[in-house]
Image (spheres, rainbow, N blue to C red):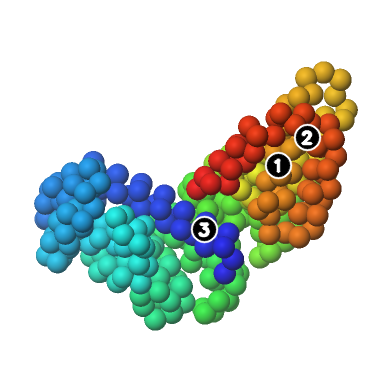
Amino acid sequence: MTKAVKHQQKQGRKIFGLVFLLLSIFFKPPAFANDTDDWAGPLRNAQTLLAKQKYRAALAAFKEQANLDNGLAQFNVALFYDLGWGMSPQRSIACQWYQKAAKNNMPGAMQALGQCFFDGQGVEQNKILAYQWFLKAYEQGIAEGACQAGELLLSGDGVDLDVTSGQRLCFQAAQQGAVSAQKKLAQWYFYGQYFPQDYQQAFNWLQRVASVKSPSSAYLLAQFYDQGIGMDVDENQALRWYEVAASGKYQKAYIPTALLYWQKFTQAKNNKEQLLAKSYLWAKISSTSSELTADKNVSEQLLQQVLLQMPVSWQKSLDTKITDHLASP
């Protein structure tokens, strides 16, 4: 598994966990979780401690209720270990708590447990159980679970291949607003994976998700405008979406962004300073951080040309911006 994929999975779990935690703080658990017990009530002290970032005390308070079979508390304990609140992340222990919460009908825990079975962390790897838990999460309102189950059917990875059902599940997830499913549909249509290649369908789905912190989707959308796929070439739109992708640290976007800014600089008659500075920024970021050898070579060649035009006095402030970009999450 690549570093980029691992980072995306971790960020996805972090966003999901924080959103669910906020819901658990301000709302009572849904009726399907427990018809008689108010799980949120006994957790008010733990939530207060967590809000104050008193992690050790908060975890102890959540665990006290988790050991009394409070499913919401069990889910929160899992988040502590998964996201590393006040500790180093311990995914295997998180998965054990997700399993307890899932058995108490917590939908978010069901989805997380499905991923645990998929990865084989904290539990023995079992793609069939992963599929079943993803589907249970979907049935309890977690739209993303449908496409997670659907992708297993599409690939036949550990389950019986069923393309029709897999496509249906992913469509359902996407139509219900699951961004992860919308991103997958866009990519699958673009590359002709699991579906016949269809650029119009890919473009339609990309338009929904490219601006929702999806660097890979923004990059694909830029390709449409840059290469004129099904439309006239539009360099301004291409540059806009390449830069969205580059800002999200999608490495393939660094060089196209730098090159388009350089091209605009060489063609412009006025207000050229920002174009030159932007070309330097993205070329330098590519040369110092990209894992793509060909891109690093191009960026180094481009930098040589840019530095012939750029005042030396600019470099210190621009390099500070580059450092800030690379250091950001």
- Please report contact status of discs 2 and 1: CB closer than 8 Å, yes or no: yes
- Of labels 3 and 2, earlier in sequence is 3
- 41 sits left or right of 147 in the view: left
- 212 sits left or right of 263 in the view: left
Which image quarter: residue 258?
top right
Name the residue that disc number 1 marks: 282
- Spatial CA distance of label 2 from label 1 is 9 Å
The image shows residue 235 at horizontal and vertical percentages of: 80, 34
Q: Is residue 134 above or below residue 49?
A: below
Tell me the crowding category of disc 3: few under 14, some 14 to 19, or many 20 or more residues within 10 angstroms, Cα based. few
Residue 235 - label = none
Q: Is residue 190 above or below residue 262?
A: below
- The three-letter code of the residue at mark 1 reads Trp
Q: Residue at x 57, y 63 (%)?
A: 3
The image shows residue 182 at horizontal and vertical percentages of: 57, 51
Label 1 sits on a secondary structure element that is helix
Name the residue that disc number 2 marks: 261
**Depth check: 208 or 13 in front?**
13
Residue 7 - label = 3
Label 3 sits on a secondary structure element that is helix
- 52 sits left or right of 118 in the view: left
Q: Is residue 69 visible?
A: yes
